[in-house]
Image (cartoon, rainbow, N blue to C red):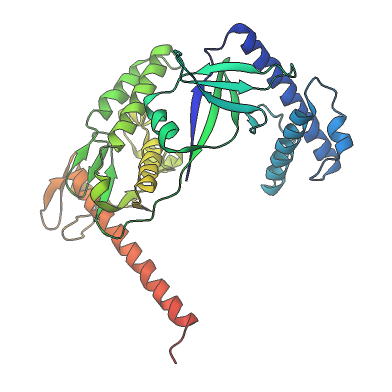
Amino acid sequence: MKRTLKFSLNSANTGKISALNKLTNEYKKAVNFYLQILSSTNKYILSEKEVKSFSSPLSYRYKQCAKRQAVKIWKSWRRNKKKGELPEFDGALILDSRFIKIEKAKASTFNYWVRMATLNKGHPALIPIKSYDYANDYFNNWKLTNGGRLRQENNNWFLLLTFEKETPPKKQKGKIIGIDIGIKKLMATSEKEFYGKEIELLMDKIQKKKQGSKAFKRAIKERDYYVNKTAKELPLDSVKAIVMENIKNIKRNTKKEKRLRKEFRSKFQRWTYPKLFSRVNQLCEINGVHFFAIDPAYTSQTCSRCGFVHKLSRNGEVFKCRNCGYTQDADYNASLNILNLGIAQQSMVAESAKVSQMDICPLN
C-alpha cells in the first residue's frame, strides 16, 4: 500500500525559490514541446534526436524525464479519447531519485533536507522541510520511495513524497459494523456509538468566513483535521469489517439536491464526505479490516426492525416507523440498515462464488 504526503518548501531562501521557478518553467516548456511533437506525429515515442532538439538549459537527464512525462500524458489523452486541442501542461514535475534526494537533518530546526538538481549543473539546491505529527509515523515506520513530485500552488512550493508499506492480511475474526454518515453527527455506528458531534459547528464556522480568505482556509484545515482525528477513534482493533454508504456522487445529483432545504444545501457545500470515506478506507487497509461500500438508497427511510419503508418515518434526528411504531435515533437506525445490506450483499457474493466454483469444478 502507498500513501502520498505533501510538504511545504517555503522555508527556502529567495535564491533557491528563484532556482525552482527557473527549473519549473524550463521543464514545463520541455513537456509541452514534446507533447506537440507527439500530437503532430500521432505516435507514442520520441527519438533521441527529437528529445535533444529542445533548446534549453535543462540537462539531458531532465529532458529525458520531461519526455517520459509527456508520453504518459499523451497516452492518457488518447486512451480516454479526449477531443479538442491538447491542453497545455501546467502540473507537477514527476522527478525520480536522480533529481531529488531526502536527507535527515542533524541538529537543525528543520527535520529533513531536500537535495534537488537545478539548472545550475553540479550545484543542487538544498531546501529544508519540516515534518508534522501525521507524517512522522510514515517517516519512522514506512519506506520512502525514490523521487517525488514538485508542485507550485499560488506561488507556494510543495514536494509530494510517497511512502509504501506491505499491506497486512485481512482479519478473519472480529465484529462487523455499519456506519451512517451525517451532518449533525459525523458517524453513527451499528454499535450505537456516535462520533464527531462537533462537525456541524465546524461547517457553520466555515460558512461564516469569506470564501478564499485566510480565516476560511484555516477553518477548512480545522475541519479536515477534525475529520482525520475522528476517523482514528473507530475501534478498528476489534473490528473485522466496516460497511459504509457510498454517497460520493450525491453533490452531483441535482434532483436530490433540489429537494434539500435551502439552509441545508448551503451547509452541505462544506460537508466533507469524500475525505471521511477515503480516510476510513485507508485506516481499514492499514489495520487489515475489510471495507465495503453499499448503495445508501432508502437506508434512512427503512425500519431496521420490521423492514417497512416510508419517507415520513424519519423526522430530523428521530426515526419512528409508520408500521410498527419502532422509535430510535435516526442515524443509528440507518447504520443498522447499512450493516444488514452489507452483510446481505457479501453473502450473495459468497454464494455466487460457490456456484461459479461448482460450475468450474463439477463433482465426479
| In-image side of 179 versus 27 (left or right) | left
Q: Residue furthest top?
A: 14
Tell me where residue 58 appears, x and y as whole percent.
Answer: 77, 23
Would residue 16 be found to the left or right of residue 219 on screen? right
Q: Is residue 250 above or below residue 32?
A: below
Residue ranking furthest to the front: 106
The answer to which of 154 and 135 lies nearer the viewer is 135
Residue 98 figure quarter: top right
Q: Which residue is found at the position 66% from the left and 11% from the top?
A: 18
Regarding residue 34, the answer to whether it shows in the image is yes
With 39 as the anchor, is 360 left or right in this view?
A: left
Using the image, determine if residue 96 lies above or below residue 155. below
In percent of width and height, residue 287 lies at 34, 47
- The total number of labels drawn is 0
Q: Residue at x 27, y 29 (%)?
A: 199
Q: Classify the position of the C terminus by image quarter.
A: bottom left
Q: Position of residue 326 (x, y in %)?
A: 11, 53
Toward the bottom, the furthest residue is: 364
Residue 43 lies in quadrant: top right
Is residue 316 something one can see in this rendering? no
- Name the residue nearer the viewer: 104 or 47: 104
Tell me residue 67's x, y (percent): 76, 35
Give me the residue at 56% from left, 18% from top.
157
Q: Looking at this view, is 241 or 8 the one in front?
A: 8
Q: Specify the quadrant of the image occupied by residue 342.
A: bottom left
Q: Is residue 125 left or right of residue 291?
A: right
Q: Is residue 279 above or below residue 324?
A: above
